Image: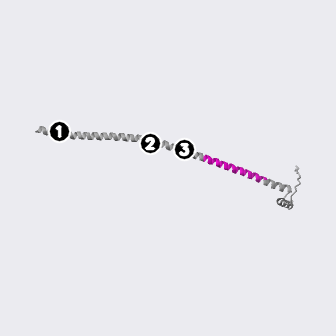
Amino acid sequence: MRKTYKCSNIKFCMEDENQRRTWEYLQGITRRDGSYGKILSDAFVAVLDSKNENKQEELLMLSLKQSEHEFEQLEEMFARVLEAKFWSLQEILTDHMEKCFQEHTLDFQADAVRAAETDDSNELGQTQEAELSEDMMAFAFTMGE
């Protein structure tokens, strides 16, 4: 199979540093190094591919920065939600603790009132016993007289 070639006439401006250096480089190549077309096409493709890779890397970096920013936003939102849940839970626990303390306080107060009543009735009973025995003694003395 025959290879198809296309010809292109390229002019280099010798006052332009890059063009002059390229022309000098091309003048110094030999058949062993390859043809002008091969050398120039390899150089163009390498430059264009690196530019495309750079653009892809830039897009990737931009995407990563955007993802990082979105992650930070999600992190902040998550922190706010957690804080709200924490305060809600703290409020629920506080209410529950207050109810428990109120119930125990009422129970304690009721027990204290019962204990006080029991003490009063015991004291009253002891007082009545002492009065009865004094009365009985007085009665017995009067009977003996």
Name the chief secondary structure element in magenta: helix
**Span shown in magenta:** 48-75
Q: Residue at the spot x=64%, y=48% of the render?
A: 69
Q: Locate residue 110, reporting x and y percent.
A: 36, 39
Q: Are marks 2 and 1 in contact (CB under 8 Å)?
A: no
Judge the density around disc 2: few (<14), some (14-19), many (≥20) Cα neighbours within 10 Å.
few
Q: Badge 3 is on which residue?
A: 84
Residue 127 lies in the magenta stretch: no
Rendering quarter of residue 35: bottom right
Q: Judge whether 94 appears above or below 58 on screen.
A: above
Q: Judge whether 102 appears above or below 17 on screen.
A: above
Disc 3 from disc 1: Cα separation: 77 Å
Lateral position of residue 126 relative to residue 62, left or right: left
Q: Amino acid at mark 1?
A: Met
Q: Residue at the spot x=78%, y=53% of the render?
A: 48
Q: Badge 2 is on which residue?
A: 98
Q: Residue at the spot x=54%, y=44% of the render?
A: 84
Disc 2 from disc 1: Cα separation: 56 Å
